[in-house]
Amino acid sequence: MAAAANDRDRDAARPCRPLSGALPTPTLAAEGIARTMMPSERASAPTPKETASRPLLVVENVRKAFGGVHAVESVSFQIEAGHVQGLIGPNGAGKTTVINIISGLLRADGGTIHLLDRRIDQLPPHKIAALGVRRTHQNIRLFAKMSVLDNVTVGQHLLRRETLVERLVFAPRGRAESARLHAEAEALLARVGLQGRARVPAAALSYGDQRRLEIARALASHPRLLLLDEPAAGMNHTEAAALGELMRDLAAQGLTILLVEHNVQLVMDVCDRVTVLNFGRVIAHGTPAEVTRDPEVIAAYLGTDEETG
Amino acid sequence: MAQQIVNGIFAGSIYALFAVGYTLVFGILDILNLAHQAVFMMAAFAALQAVLKWKWNFGPALLFATAIAGVLGILIYYIAYRPLRRRPDTYFSTLISTIAFAAILEALALRWYGARTSRFPLNTFPDHTFHIGSAAFTLLQAVIVAGALVLTLGLQALVRYTRLGKAMRAVAENERAARVLGIDVERVVLVSFAISSALGGIAGVMYGLVYNSVAPGMGHAVELKGLSVIVLGGMGSIPGAVLGGFLLGLVEVASVAQLGSNTRDAVAFIVLFAILLLRPRGLFGRRLVREV
Amino acid sequence: MLGALHAFYTQHSALIQVGGINAILAISLYFTLATGLLSLANAAFMGIGAYTGALLTMRAHWPFPLVVLAGGVLAATTAVPLGLPVLRLRGVFLAIATIGFGEVVRIFFINWSYAGGALGIDGVPRKTTWWHIYLALVLLLFICWRLRRSRAGYAMEAIRQDEAASATMGINVTAYKVAVFVAGAFIAGIAGSLQAHLRYIVDPNDYGFSTAVDILVYAVVGGMNVFIGPVIGAALITALPDILRQFTSLGVQPGPDRALASGIVLLLVILFLPEGLVSIARFRPWRRRQTTAIATQRARAGP
């Protein structure tokens, strides 16, 4: 759509997307928000496998202790751009801690994390977010008193350029931006299956819908890396399958996903690679097929099964 | 020097007695009961009323005032706390409700006794003066210090060694678990309010007697200093409140001696700031700050 | 008609002017409350504005508009070094820290002999008129209105509901908190300067904890979720003594009973109408909206 493309080109702070259809190799501009593509553009884009030449996220020797408890110990792994990577392990293995550290809510005690060439482990969460990292939370953290649409609008925070002064003088640019972002937000809601629910207070949604809203919110400002913390928890088979399809869709458009999940079927279906944690350490890494055959992984899970009877 | 120490200990004991009630409620419920100072004030008026109008002796008047304070504590529980328990923002709404309750109490005191300062009659408490070295103190001051120590130690013993105390600590730790374990949480909370207010009331009577002034606004200065004390001692810590109270009393007196009487009131707040910025959990506080 | 308005104004001019200033103060608090910060420092910032204004007018003879602005600027400047360390504190601890700050400022003024010490400043020329006050108020209300669906407005609301989640959305939580804190201080400083030139006197005891509580009461009674709430609360509470005066025949004493009435109103509001008085008006439209939403959901019952 020509008009939309002109708008985007005019926004100086964002990296220009060449109209030829070739996906630029990921670079981190000052704001560093790479765009994933809207559905209408999908046809012209190459698959991410053709473009990824180096890992998007490199986690090296990260450790974190709480008091005397070593939640995470010398954890290292990498994620290729455009991949969906699973992070699994028994309860208490440290998966959420790893997500918290990557997103900046926790400071690691040691180790480094690089997003492409940029070291992010010492940055505050909002700066990491500005580099294109988004997440959902294990216990849903929506803005419960806001409407569904408003939640997504908050997610668009980094996209909004309208200054307060412009707003005070009713500048037309602001109105155009609001209208455009509103449309994008509605489209996003439709994409996760929440169309028509824009005005509903977020707290009134069902559990599964809330999880989907959280994902919509995380996608709102076109992230490059999405961290999902147990997004399928509480979903039935159909819902989980739909979620899996959404994830593969997003990955096909260039989004990189780190998926923490207990739903093993979903992980097998969706992930390109899987990292397995147990007691805060990486015990296996590979394709889903490789990992499920790994004796140490089997022991970790079977061991847990025995304990819980 | 010795005199200053004596003065500091004495002032500190009232702060300690007042603060202990504050910190007890905060420790168990995570709320700040800003009506505490109004109970402090009302108890002083109750004792005054008993002594002046009904010609009671000091002992019965004190008991009466303590009872009134306890009843007010129970009222605070029923009116300002219980209806708000289920709210997500309990700490804020109870802040407001206790402020409202305090305003009502103060307005009533204003209506009944007027704004002027009232005084206890001179013979309310026997007048003896003692000497330790160069320091002089009155029997009243000695009784206050001793009383404060006995009461606060008694409270600490209650909390540590009795069943009620264990129940209080359980509720403070994890209310839901306490309920599941069969503890009557409502009763524990009610009793906590009553005890906290009773202690605050005793502090009020002592304060009114020793500084010889009872007025509807008398709780304000102490309220804010009490905040400093519990922050210094650590929110929810009884030994902390006691130690903090005495420390504040001593530091205030030292500051007046060295830097002039203007600094007296400022000390409490400078200490408050220092603690909040450098070591928010205070001397003995267990938790850092409330996890939101 | 105009004559009647004029008569109404002259009879109630004090009320209208004081009410306007209280409304400005209430808005100064609204900014911080809307971001989830319980700051009780605004009375102190008001005091800083008042003293700045009075001294600049009486000792330095600056022009009035500049004096008013200076009050705001000085208050805002004080807010920066205070805010940075203090805004890290959570909930009740922030409230306590700001109370402490308020007391330190009050004690400072009481001991500042250049500014009259405990007696304060007397004889400040009366320069504030009702249109100064209401111009400021209307401007502020306009800004609040435009803030509502703006980037900053959404950020503030998000921070209020969940700071950590907001940060992961790219919102610089600390920057916003400091910004609203300083903005609130600026507005309170302006109110203080305006008030100083209305009441002839600047009394240090007017800027302490009880005033801070008064401002909080305006916001709570009116409603903290929408910007017009604190203004309504301020109007009501300011008018309370006059309302009570109508009942003197029934034995009501406006002095102590104003405090009693305020306390009762506050208690009733927090117990039964926690969203403030404005929620009465918004109750029905919201219900209607929600019913529509539910109906729409049912109509679109999909896969």
Image: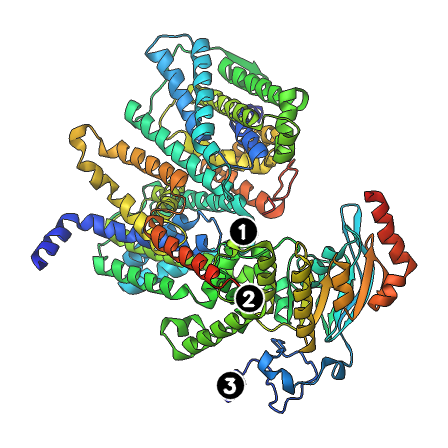
**Residues tagged 1 and 2 counted as in contact (Cβ below 8 A):** no
Letter of the chain that mark 3 sits on in the rendering: A
Q: Of tags 1 and 2, which is closer to the observer? A: 2
Say whether marks 3 and 1 touch (CB < 8 Å): no
From the image, state whether disc 3 or disc 1 is nearer to you: 3
Q: Are marks 3 and 1 on the same chain?
A: no
Quick one: C23 or B176, which is closer to the camera? B176
The number of numbered discs placed on residues in the rendered structure image is: 3
Q: CA distance from mark 1 to mark 2?
A: 28 Å
The lab-note entry on whether marks 3 and 2 share a chain reads yes
Of pointers 3 and 2, the one earlier in the residue sequence: 3
Q: Residue at x 53, y 62 (%)?
A: C175
Q: Position of residue B203 (x, y in %)?
A: 48, 23
Instruction: Establish if C255 lies above or below C37.
Output: above
x and y percentages locating residue A12 in the rendered image: 54, 83
Q: At label 3, which amino acid type do we have? A: Arg
Q: What x and y, as percent, mark residue C266?
A: 36, 39
Q: Can residue A150 be seen at all in this image of the molecule?
A: yes
Res. B239 visible in picture = no
SS at mark 2? helix
Question: In the rendered image of this protein, does residue C162 appear above or below residue B4?
Answer: below
Q: Position of residue B291 (x, y in %)?
A: 61, 46
